[in-house]
Amino acid sequence: MNNINKHSSSNLNKYQCNHSFAINRITAFSEKLAEMVTKVKHSRILNLGCGEGFDINNLFKNKLIEFHYACGLDRNLSSLKFSRDVITDFRFDVVNGDLQSLPLRLSSFDLILCLEVLERLSHPLRVLREISHQFDGYCLFSVPNEPAYRLTRMLLLRQNILQCGNHPEHLHNWSKRTFCRLIGDYFVVDNVSITFPWTIVLCHRR
């Protein structure tokens, strides 16, 4: 039995969901992400909290994107093993580690992706502070846009109704305004997209 057959996670469930709305939204997210990536140098990409590697793999498949190397960091070893089974078309190194204690030299990369991760961390400000101190390139952050994300889960997908749609792994909730203000405390915000139900922010070091 390979890693794909025995692995499971909430992120994997999201990308393998066959609900038409979920498929449409993830496709729109991937397209918007690719559009924003084309605005900056992206030959060497670091994907923090890469999970199973779906986002970086979708970027590679987009005709607008050209890169030959990416690195993924995640604390879930099973997710990293899954990503190695999925990503075979370009060089993709994986590092098993915690975002809240970064084990990598960030200056080795042109672009950092941190997608659907900050809302799950106990100390997201620590991560933002560390990146802003170490990294001179561009970053792309995304989080659920609240309260739209919770309402969608509760009313349309019928998930976590008793928790008002809040995902059980999410420790923080941000609207577009509050998230942009948070990112603006550490970076210069270059571009913001509301790709329902997510907020995506392109930024660089002050």
Image (tube, helix red, strand yellow):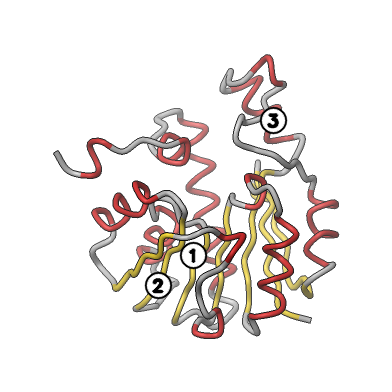
**Local secondary structure at mark 2:** strand
**Local secondary structure at mark 1:** strand
Give 82 or 43, whichever is nearer the viewer.
82
Give 127 or 47, whichever is nearer the viewer.
127
- Could you tell me which residue is drawn at 35 percent across and 63 percent down? 61
Give 61 or 169, whichever is nearer the viewer.
169
Give residue 91's quadrant in the image: bottom left
Q: Position of residue 67 (x, y in %)?
A: 39, 78
- Could you tell me which residue is drawn at 40 percent across and 40 percent down? 12
Position above or below: 54 against 1: below
- In three-dimensional space, the C-alpha distance between marks 1 and 2, rounded to whole angstroms, equals 7 Å
Residue at numbered disc 1: 47
Work out whether mark 1 precedes mark 2 in sequence or the reverse, and give the earlier one.
1
Position above or below: 56 against 79: below
Q: Which mark is residue 150?
A: 3
Q: Position of residue 140 (x, y in %)?
A: 62, 66
**Local secondary structure at mark 3:** helix
Give residue 8's quadrant in the image: top left
Q: Residues within 10 Å of mark 3 (few under 14, many from 20)?
A: many
With 178 as the anchor, is 39 left or right in this view? left
* Circles 3 and 2: CB atoms closer than 8 Å: no
Q: Which mark is residue 101?
A: none
- In three-dimensional space, the C-alpha distance between marks 3 and 2, rounded to whole angstroms, equals 32 Å
* Circles 1 and 2: CB atoms closer than 8 Å: yes
Residue at numbered disc 2: 70
Query: The N terminus lies in which quarter of the figure?
Result: top left
With 38 as the anchor, is 2 left or right in this view? left
